[in-house]
Structure formats: structure tokens, C-alpha cells
Amino acid sequence: MPRKPFLNHYKFFLVILISAAFLSACQATIIPRPTVEVVGELLAVDGGSYTNVSPAELDTMLMSKDFTFINVHTPFEGKIAQTDLFIAYDLINQDQDKLPTDKNTKIVLYCRSGHMSDNAAKTLIKLGYTNIWNLSGGMVAWENASLSIEH
């Protein structure tokens, strides 16, 4: 008869142990995205320079976003999450009121292929902006890197 309380404690301990093992197996594992060092490629143009970044570099930059993010593609063909503004690349001169007033503000541009944002970067340099970044290859390169576009 004295063995029964021992068996009850043993069964209770076994149930707790199995429950803990089951619950720990059911927990979701969060795998962080790898970050890439943001170095970019500095391009000299008339009046200054801007920096081209790869999709992986921009993805890292977006994790701790500290810039104005502008889609300059026309017509609209989608956007990257966290986009702040839509300004057609060829209307930047006319839409200066939408741009940051501080010409040292970090601005990152993108379009579908990189051509329109390259033109927009050159225009912003001519307007006196000093901290311009551009997504090299645009949304095409972004999607080719298995990153998503919102439509």
C-alpha cells in the first residue's frame, strides 16, 4: 500500500515532463533575416554623387529605416513596403514641395528597373541634395532577390 503515493507522484511527474516536451516542440522558431553590410557603390555625377545599393543592402537598411523612401516609377507598377512617397522621376522639379526641406536628409529612390531612379538621383543632386541613395536594378532586382513587391 505505501507504494501507491509514490506511483501517483511518478505519474504526475511523467505527465509534466511529457507536456513540457510537447509544448517546447510546438513553439514557433523565429529565424532572423540575415543582414548585409551596407557599403553601396558611390557614383560621381555632375554636381555631386549618389550611392547605388543592392537589394540585400536595401533590405538591411529597411530593418532600421532612417530615410525618406521614394518610388519614382511611372506609371505605378507596385511598391516596396515602407515606401513614403510616390513622385514621378520626370516631375521631381515640379514636386519639390513633397521632398524633405533639409537637403542633407537621406533619400532612397527606386523604380522598376533602376533607369528612372538613376535619372531622379541626378536631378536631386542638381537640386542640391547631398545624401541620395538608389536601388540598383530597381524592383526587378528586388524581386529577383526573392523580396516582395506590393501591388
Image: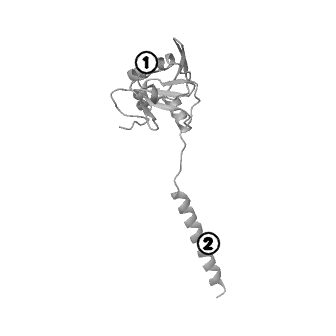
Query: Which colour style is shown?
Result: one colour
93 relative position to 46: left or right: left
Give the number of callouts.
2
Classify mark 1: residues with Cα within 10 Å, few (<14), some (14-19) or many (20+): some
Picture coordinates of residue 141, whole percent (x, y):
43, 27
119 relative position to 66: left or right: left
Residue occupying image coordinates x 45% and y 30%: 98
- Quadrant that contains the N terminus: bottom right
- Quadrant that contains the C terminus: top left
Disc 1 marks a residue whose amino acid type is Asn
Classify mark 2: residues with Cα within 10 Å, few (<14), some (14-19) or many (20+): few
Outermost residue to the front: 97
Outermost residue to the left: 75
Q: Earlier in the sequence, mark 1 or mark 2?
A: 2
Outermost residue to the right: 2
Residue occupying image coordinates x 47% and y 17%: 122
- Indicate the secondary structure of the residue bearing disc 1: helix
Picture coordinates of residue 94, whole percent (x, y):
41, 23
Q: Which residue is mark 2?
A: 13
The Cα atoms of the two marked residues, 1 and 2, are separated by 69 Å
Residue 119's tag is 1
Q: Nearer the viewer, residue 53 or 146?
A: 53
